[in-house]
Image: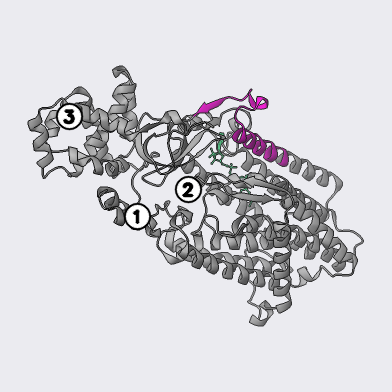
């Protein structure tokens, strides 16, 4: 068995992507397949590093000690007594000296300036923390003693860093975040193990990502706006003239929202999907490594679930079940699902208060109850092996979306006495069915998405998965029941062509990246150009990912266009998905850009210089 050089929990020095700087990191685990170590930096950034990008802390300390040894014993004595050893300046300087050790040892002096450019671009706060333990070797005299060329250069760059530290909000922001402010004393007093352990266990000390979605105020807004918007579009869809510029329709009496039977159907549907999910059928896939180094297993039998669901629904219809109930009770079904999503979110929030801190997502523990409730605290809440987030993302809402579309087709036939649904309805149904089936067929791919890897499970995802997807993504089919739109055959052909182009781009680009991420040395991908990054992973710069930085979003947007076109241009309502999706993907793209810049440093900048457009070639 190959030996693993660094063990889980080891404190080591990890190279920062795209630079020659080393920071103190903690080893979270080792993946024998990819031969990568998962490490966490002081600011909470997690990376996968190759063994060659990791050095033992002692290696760095030995070098600084060897310098001290060459000094006079008198100097050493005075250092041990010095009251000035913990000044911020000296700690920052020693931090820079650690960087200098790496710089001066690994680079010829002619290249130092370029390397030092990296130094000034990087904020040094995390190293200030790492230096706290080393502060015992600092005093006023040391400033004079370390009067060699390297330290002069470093002091210069350090001064620049200090001067720029507050205004420099550049891409390589390694500054300790507000939320982990408590971590500093724990680091500064390594001789207080109890306090350190307590602080490490307390959820408030988990580093939190910057607040998203408008922060705390934004969370209040979204909590009110999202359900209100669903209600608005459902009520609009029932109007003869559902113009978005008309005043909102009057609220129906409160009792029309509630229908016990609708709640019963929703619960039955969720339980049925849960049953299919836990059946020991289909592959058990590995999730991505967690902060703890562990990988969770996921039952990826989504395709099986949709096939069984389709058979059960077909049998039920054959036996006389009237699915048009879904159209006539759309509001009540949405209300019932909304209640379930709120109860689920409350449960998720409460249980997250009792979970281990390492199980929390970095983005959902701001300490503000409303924000955390909205964003989600726990990363992978599970009841035994039942993964609540994965289940909700992929099953009741997604398969429910197809069920609702199908019910709308039946409702259209009933309402207009048709023998078959209209072309427009057929196109909307088939297009969206293809999208969902494709997602379930490639279910494993969701394990590498932002939702699964980074976002905690709270109201945002619970509501999104259970209410938003099935009750707003079905808006085109819902709209067509009362607002038929006749399509000529050439129009049908043009729309199908557009959909296929979008699907081709979407599938090819997603598959290319998935294949590359799963096996970078796949011979089928050997023709593609790549940029190496310091994390050990490379970035594709040719093929689909060389055209734009998010070719998969481009394909998805083209498909969204093809979903709205069958509804015609008489109202804006069925175009809602297209408009919403542009906003969603542009926002998602900018979130991903910042994440990747954080992960890959200058390699990411090089990628962005090579591939200049984000989603649409030569436009955006
Ligand atoms: P992506 O699948 O685009 O994943 C982004 C990640 O890909 C990055 O974080 C990076 O991760 C990796 N990456 C980026 N550039 C490169 C490159 N050049 N070479 C190799 N790897 C790269 O993001 P999403 O999870 O947002 O989207 C997945 C799909 O889901 C998309 O098709 C999207 O349209 C769709 N989607 C649909 C929604 C809907 O409601 N219908 C909602 C959201 C998404 P790393 O390097 O760590 O691997």
Q: Is residue 370 left or right of residue 444?
A: left
Does 530 appear above or below 206?
above
The answer to whether residue 391 is seen in the rendering is yes
- Checking the image for residue 591, the label placed there is none
Say which label, 1 or 2, has the lower sequence index: 1
Mark 3 — residue?
A: 68
Magenta residues (range): 503-532
Say which label, 3 or 2, has the lower sequence index: 3
Q: Position of residue 386 (x, y in %)?
A: 63, 58
Question: Is label 1 in a helix, a strand or a loop?
Answer: helix
Front in this rendered view, residue 239 or 14: 14
Q: CA distance from mark 1 to mark 2?
A: 16 Å
Q: Main secondary structure of the magenta part?
A: helix
- Checking the image for residue 292, the label placed there is 2
Q: Position of residue 543 (x, y in %)?
A: 63, 29
Q: Residue at x 73, y 57 (%)?
A: 279
Residues at circles 3 and 2 in contact by the CB criterion of under 8 Å? no
Q: Quadrant of the N terminus?
A: top right
Q: CA distance from mark 3 to mark 2?
A: 37 Å
Q: Position of residue 345 (x, y in %)?
A: 55, 66
Disc 2 residue: CB within 8 Å of ligand 1 = no
The answer to whether residue 330 is seen in the rendering is no
Q: Residues within 10 Å of mark 1 (few under 14, many from 20)?
A: few
Instruction: Name the image quarter holding residue 424.
Output: bottom right
Q: Residue at x 65, y 57 (%)?
A: 391
């Amino acid at each position: 068995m190959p030996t693993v050089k660094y063990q889980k929990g080891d404190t080591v020095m990890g190279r920062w992507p795209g630079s020659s700087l080393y920071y103190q990191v903690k080893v979270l685990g080792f993946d024998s397949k990819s031969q990568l170590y998962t490490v966490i930096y002081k600011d909470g950034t997690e990376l996968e590093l190759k063994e060659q990008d990791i050095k033992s802390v002692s290696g760095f300390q030995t070098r600084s000690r060897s310098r001290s040894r060459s000094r006079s014993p008198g100097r050493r004595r005075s250092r041990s007594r010095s009251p000035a050893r913990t000044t911020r300046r000296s700690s920052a300087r020693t931090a820079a000296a650690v960087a200098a050790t790496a710089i001066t040892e690994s680079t010829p002096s002619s290249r130092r300036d370029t390397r030092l450019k990296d130094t000034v671009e990087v904020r040094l706060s995390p190293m200030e923390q790492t230096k706290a333990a080393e502060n015992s070797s600092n005093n006023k005299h040391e400033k004079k003693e370390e009067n060699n060329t390297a330290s002069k250069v470093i002091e210069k760059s350090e001064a620049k860093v200090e001067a720029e530290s507050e205004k420099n909000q550049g891409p390589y922001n390694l500054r300790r975040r507000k939320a982990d402010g408590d971590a500093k004393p724990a680091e500064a007093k390594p001789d207080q193990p109890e306090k350190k352990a307590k602080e490490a266990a307390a959820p408030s000390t988990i580093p939190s990502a910057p607040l998203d979605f408008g922060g705390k105020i934004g969370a209040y807004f979204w909590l009110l706006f999202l359900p209100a918007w669903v209600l608005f579009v459902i009520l609009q869809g029932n109007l003869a003239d559902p113009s978005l510029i008309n005043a909102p329709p009057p609220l129906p009496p409160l009792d029309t929202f509630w229908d016990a039977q609708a709640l019963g159907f929703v619960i039955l549907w969720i339980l049925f999907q849960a049953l299919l999910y836990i059946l020991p059928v289909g592959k058990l896939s590995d999730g991505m490594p967690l902060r703890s180094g562990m990988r969770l297993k996921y039952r990826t039998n989504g395709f099986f679930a949709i096939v069984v669901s389709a058979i059960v629904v077909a049998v039920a219809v054959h036996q006389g079940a009237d699915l048009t109930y879904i159209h006539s009770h759309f509001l009540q079904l949405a209300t019932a699902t909304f209640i379930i999503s709120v109860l689920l979110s409350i449960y998720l929030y409460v249980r997250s208060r009792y979970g281990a801190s390492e199980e929390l997502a970095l983005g959902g523990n701001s300490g503000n109850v409303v924000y955390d409730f909205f964003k989600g605290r726990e990363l992978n809440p599970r009841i035994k092996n039942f993964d609540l987030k994965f289940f909700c993302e992929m099953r009741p809402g997604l398969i429910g979306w197809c069920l609702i579309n199908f019910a709308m087709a039946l409702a259209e036939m009933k309402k207009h006495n048709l023998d078959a649904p209209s072309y427009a309805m057929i196109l909307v149904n088939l297009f969206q069915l293809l999208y969902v089936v494709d997602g379930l067929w490639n279910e494993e791919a969701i394990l590498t998405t932002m939702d699964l890897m980074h976002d905690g499970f709270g109201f945002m995802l619970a509501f999104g998965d259970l209410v938003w997807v099935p009750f707003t993504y079905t808006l085109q089919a819902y709209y067509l029941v009362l607002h038929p739109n006749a399509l000529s055959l050439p129009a049908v052909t043009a729309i199908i062509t557009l959909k296929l182009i979008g699907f081709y781009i979407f599938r090819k680009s997603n598959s290319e990246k998935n294949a590359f991420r799963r096996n970078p040395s796949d011979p089928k991908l050997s023709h593609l150009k790549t940029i190496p990054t310091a994390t050990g992973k490379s970035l594709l710069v040719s093929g689909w990912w060389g055209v734009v930085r998010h070719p998969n979003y481009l394909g998805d947007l083209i498909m969204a266009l093809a979903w709205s076109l069958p509804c015609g241009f008489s109202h804006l309502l069925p175009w809602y998905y297209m408009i919403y999706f542009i906003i969603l993907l542009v926002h998602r793209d900018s979130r991903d850009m910042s994440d990747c810049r954080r992960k890959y440093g200058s390699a990411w900048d090089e990628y962005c210089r090579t591939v200049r457009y984000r989603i649409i070639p030569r436009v955006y």
